[in-house]
Amino acid sequence: MEQVVAWLHEKNPGLDSPIGVDEDLIEARLIDSMDFLEFIDLLEEISGSSIDLQEVTIDDFRTLARVQERFLDSAGRAEVTAG
């Protein structure tokens, strides 16, 4: 998760406060449409698994807690296509 937080801070250099695990990353504009595919690439790199965009929703990327649960926890990895 440290890599995800570091990436978010890199994309938002004016962000001085910590990002809460339940903060809405999209509503807070920490992830925008221009960065979304790069964010998915980052998650695939960290998890070692491909993310099938047909199997996810925008809510899967909305908070750090959900990203952790869906893509980075071992249970979440079972739902992501290996590859």
Image (cartoon, rainbow, N blue to C red):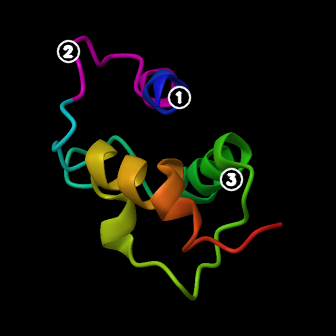
Q: Which residue is found at the position 70% from the left and 74% from the top? A: 81
Q: CA distance from mark 1 to mark 2?
A: 14 Å
Q: CA distance from mark 1 to mark 3?
A: 14 Å
Within the magenta stretch, is there residue 49? Answer: no
Highlighted magenta segment, given as a residue range: 7-19
Estimate the x, y position of residue 10 in percent, counting from the top left: 51, 22
Residue indicated by mark 2: 17
Within the magenta stretch, is there residue 10? Answer: yes
Amino acid type, mark 3: Glu
Residue 20: quarter of image: top left
State if disc 2 and disc 1 touch (CB < 8 Å): no
Amino acid type, mark 1: Trp
| Left-right relation of 71 to 29 | right
Q: In the rendered image of this protein, does residue 77 appear above or below residue 72?
A: below
Q: In the rendered image of this protein, does residue 78 appear above or below residue 43?
A: below
Judged from this view, the residue extending furthest toward the bottom is 54
Estimate the x, y position of residue 42 in percent, counting from the top left: 65, 44
Mark 3, other Cα within 10 Å: few <14 / some 14–19 / many ≥20? some
Amino acid type, mark 2: Ser
Estimate the x, y position of residue 4 in percent, counting from the top left: 49, 33
- Secondary structure at numbered mark 3: helix
Residue indicated by mark 3: 44
Q: Which residue is found at the position 23% from the left and 18% from the top? A: 18
Comparing 65 with 6, the one in front is 65
Comparing 24 with 55, the one in front is 55
Residue 14: quarter of image: top left
* Secondary structure that dominates the magenta span: loop
Mark 2, other Cα within 10 Å: few <14 / some 14–19 / many ≥20? few
State if disc 3 and disc 2 touch (CB < 8 Å): no
Residue indicated by mark 1: 7
